[in-house]
Amino acid sequence: MIARLPVGDRRAVRAAVRQLVGREPATAARVVLLYGAAAFAGLGPPWLLGTVVDSIRSGHAESVNRLLPAVLACALTQMLFTRYAIDAGRRFGERSLTYLREDLLDRVLALPTAIVERAGGGDLMTRSTTDVATVGVAVREALPEMLIAGIRVVLLLAVVFVLDWRLGVGALAGVPVLLLVCRWYLRTARTAYLAEAAAGTEISDTLMAGTSGARTVTALGMEARRIGAGDETTSVHLAAQITTLRLRTLLYSSKDVAGVLPVTVVLIIGGFLHDGHSVPLGTVVAAALYVQQLGSPLDTLVGRAEQLQRAGAAMARLVGVPAAPAARTSDGPIPADDRVRLSSVRFAYLPGHDVLRDIDLDVGPGERIAVVGPSGSGKTTLARLLAGIDRPSSGAVTVGGVSVSDLAPETLRRRIVLVTQEHHVFLGTVRENLAIAAPTADDDALRDALRTVGADWVDTLSDGMGTVLGPGATVLDAAREQQLALARIVLADPRVILLDEATSLLDPATARDAERSLSAVLEGRTVIAFAHRLHTARDADRVVVLEDGRITEQGSHDELHSAGGVYASLWHAQVGT
């Protein structure tokens, strides 16, 4: 069942923005000052041109030669200030984006595994890529440009009021239209852009499900169903995009009206005032030029406001990540020993559909248990409960008398490690991949761990332990990836080992050798192996048979084989003797 990660509210977004800007207040202040200086320098040319007009009308044309160089100087000054302001703003934006990415990674890593899994890969992928990129564009470009545009609007209007207050009132003619539309837009846009982002997440999830399970889809003839699912999510996304497009259309239309109306009104008022000899023609010309200049910053404000709404929705999704219940970070209770107990455990992914029913199991310290059963019997779910990934719907899962779900993450990792049939190789060297489990281990310890699981092939790689693994470098096959994961377990040295089909991708001979080597290394540790290959069960101290979510048999291999029950049937079907 998909349970999307939360979305932050407006207050959380504002707090996150303040925190982001507050990390470098001096740099932010420098950006504001540079943009302010650029906007102030841009006020000179219209004022000087108005003075030129009045000088010519009064018969003092010789002053033009002195004023025109001043116009050029103002333009060059504005250009220089703007250039340095943009450079400073983008540097500030890139650093802020770095902080944002690092914070998001920390938040995601602090989440319980079950919450991340149930949110779906598409949700995290779109938040960590599309949403971060959207916020990045806003911080690097939209915010600086809106800042200078806002300063220019305020200064331009202020100068028109200085020229003549009546012309200043005329310059405000487009403000009511713009304010009304912007107020409506700001109330509506956040919900619309969040819906668009959520629809994009659904598309990502649908694509990921189809591509990752492409072989299964083909084998079961489900192509038409998957295409239909893709069409449905695409239609929802298209509808959400059309909604935001309508919002932008109305916003841009109001901006055009708000840009043309003040110029018209100022020219009309200025004409009447000049005819009445109340205002010189140069003043009217300067005021009209200033008001005409409002069009450019208004275009920027409105255009970038739309980007800020997208960024606001993206930021809400980013700050919503820590709103999800985080894994425990404080020190909790310490288990008394390595005894693992399950008492009356029941678990259901969906209410009313139990996967595990009334599980009672007591595994002593150092005991080796093999949990076997047909596919779908609940083995992997039981492993997840023992690893603390999921909580039981009822009952208790404890280690050393402490509920596994209550252990702090570091304590849990030192105590219990789950090794599944799904493994990940990080982009980096063999050494770096192994050092994840033991950061202080030297190369000799790393090689010992590799030899323990039969991974002697590392010495045949081009650079040995320094060989880079991953796409674009050396790509390991599934069996070697699994051996690398097993070597990490040897290095991690946990007290309780959960092996969920941990050697399923190795060929039988290699798997047998790896398991024997692990048996020697894990002497004295509690081992619970969940396996289809029953030779694992033969070496266990005790075999537990899981069938339809219940424990139906327990005992040694010989006891269960002689009993002629479910285990004996599985053994004969697989081994034949």
Image: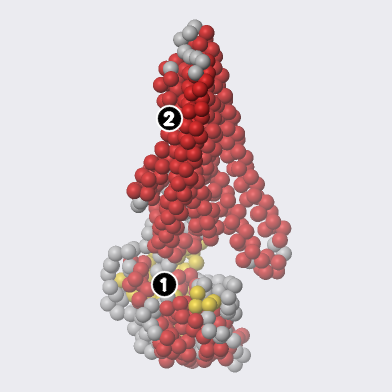
- Residue bearing the label numbered 1: 387
Q: Quadrant of the C terminus?
A: bottom right
Residue count near mark 2 (Cα–Cα under 10 Å), binned few <14, some 14–19, many ≥20: some
Q: Is residue 153 left or right of residue 264?
A: left
Badge number at residue 155 = 2
Q: Amino acid at mark 2?
A: Leu
x then y, percent, for residue 303 = 54, 38
> Is label 2 in contact with label 1 (beta carbons under 8 Å)?
no
On the image, which quarter does residue 555 sit in?
A: bottom left
Q: Residue at x 43, y 17 (%)?
A: 164
Element on which disc 2 rests: helix
Residue count near mark 1 (Cα–Cα under 10 Å), binned few <14, some 14–19, many ≥20: many
Element on which disc 1 rests: loop
Q: Residue at x 42, y 51 (%)?
A: 92
Q: CA distance from mark 2 to mark 1?
A: 63 Å
Badge number at residue 163 = none
x then y, percent, for residue 348 = 47, 63
Residue 237 sits above or below residue 276 on the image: below
Q: Earlier in the sequence, mark 2 or mark 1?
A: 2
